[in-house]
Image (cartoon, rainbow, N blue to C red):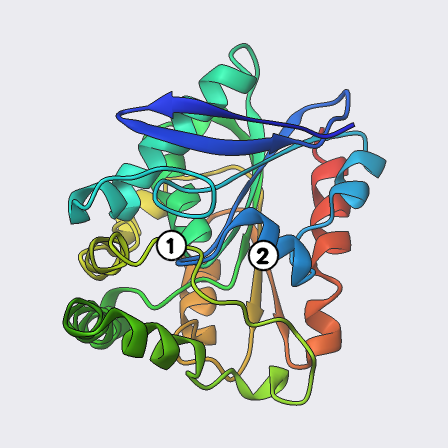
Amino acid sequence: MAESGTITIDGAALAYTDHGGDGPVVFHAHGLSSCSANEQAAGLIDADAIRGAGLRLIAYDARGHGGSSGRPDPADYTWDNLADDLLALADVFSPGAPVHAIGVSMGTATILHALTRRPERFRSVVLGAPPTAWATRAAQAAVYGELAAAIEADAAAAASMMESMPVPEIFADTDRPDPAPAVDPHLLPAVLRGAGASDLPEPRALAAVALPVLLLAWDTDPGHPVSTTERLAELLPDADAHVSRTAADVGTWPGRAAEFFATRG
């Protein structure tokens, strides 16, 4: 039986759902402007599959997203700061044992920052839709800055603009849900600027992360280019990568993640 609640960390009440299970903990970290409920609706996470693999799923909303509170300070939403939240949650829900984690986009970046700082807190991770990084990051950061300024000028028009942004080609002919941003409009500029000020960890730090990693990319999305996944696969010593070129194949991600975690304790 799923149980929901909040835990206050550094001034933010972080909303979580404990989906139950008796095995090692798996954390789910969602993408920018999304929330755990939206990603379950989109089929990016499956609590039944995780429990069926003998694991315990904790899905949480990043600060300022979904049911979690936040402050209008961009520094709160940098990927490095979001990693602090993940590590604090791991210490609450699994203080005596390392955890698994599955991320999507911003959630993937959050996990990578946490990994490079405290690798001993993790058993294995699944990293979905790795975002722009390093050489491709500046252009994406500029987009976030423009969106933040537009929201401050006209929140309603900017929110509509975000909802109408083009979807990756592989999802164009599907009924995949594309919900409105799960962020309060008065926080959204800070959330976007925090993302724009962020990047993935330095390659040298990633090359030192030795635990098992499954990388899952989808094609045709410039905000989540396959090139990031390919570079991560080169850097991370124990990484396997899979690139989805159809929406149907993206639908296999929850099962792939559950199987990957189950074989790694």
Q: Quadrant of residue 217?
A: bottom right
* Numbered badge on residue 217: none
The disc labelled 2 sits on which kind of residue?
A: Asn
Q: Secondary structure at mark 1?
A: loop
**Position of residue 196 measured from the top left corner of the image (x, y, whole percent):** 21, 62
Which residue is identified by label 1?
183
Pick whichever, 132 or 75, lies toward us: 75
Q: Quadrant of residue 142?
A: bottom left
Query: Which residue does the image show at 26% across and 52% down from the upper left?
Result: 187
The disc labelled 1 sits on which kind of residue?
A: Val
Which of marks 2 and 1 precedes in the sequence? 2
As displayed, is residue 247 above or below residue 63? below
**Position of residue 65 measured from the top left corner of the image (x, y, whole percent):** 41, 48
Pick whichever, 75 or 1, lies toward us: 1
Which residue is identified by label 2?
38
Q: Secondary structure at mark 2?
A: helix
Query: Which residue does the image show at 72% across and 54% down from the upper left?
Result: 254
